Amino acid sequence: MNKVAEQSKTRQQIQNPDYELKSISEEVIEDCARVCGLTVKQVMSKSRKTEFVEARWLAYRILYPMGYSLISIGRIFNRDHGTVLNGLRKMQDMIDTKNKHMNLMLEELRNKYRNI
């Protein structure tokens, strides 16, 4: 299965609670949800609640350096590539300003994902 097909299938599979996670993107989303104290469904939702948005930004921050393009990340989350780019920038601003909350979540994920 090619990467585009896998990513378009990802959104449908991740919303099914009976589905066993298998792809890297799904694993990243699950880990970000866990670290943020959310469910995968909440992270994947269209909600603009701060805690949901920041969990998505965290996932963008992990997936982008892994080689996922802005477009492919956008497809996974059903978002525009510009939204992903904005999220990456906001995430970097939070890291640069030493946001304690975000840095704690990043630190927890650093052991598993070396690229962040």
Image (cartoon, helix red, strand yellow):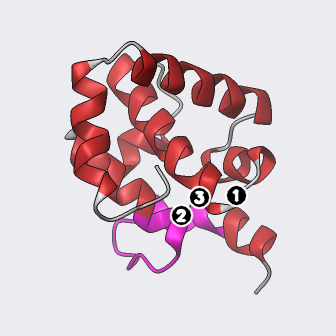
- Residue positioned 28% across, 61% down in the render: 111
Q: Earlier in the sequence, mark 3 or mark 1?
A: 3
Q: In whole angstroms, how far apart are the C-alphas of marks 2 and 1?
A: 9 Å
Image marks 2 and 1: residues in contact by CB distance under 8 Å: yes
Instruction: Give the quadrant of the N terminus.
Output: bottom right
For this view, does 5 lie left or right of residue 63?
Answer: right
Q: Amino acid at mark 1?
A: Tyr
Q: Which mark is residue 108?
A: none
Number of numbered tags placed on the structure image: 3
Q: Is residue 56 on the magenta stretch? A: no
The residue tagged 3 is: 11
- Residue positioned 69% across, 65% down in the render: 7
Instruction: Label 1, secondary structure: give it.
Output: loop
Q: Amino acid at mark 3?
A: Arg
The residue tagged 2 is: 25
Q: Nearer the viewer, mark 3 or mark 1?
A: 1
Q: Is residue 38 visible?
A: no
- Residue positioned 63% across, 50% down in the render: 64
Q: Is residue 98 visible?
A: yes
User: Magenta segment, which residues?
Assistant: 9-27
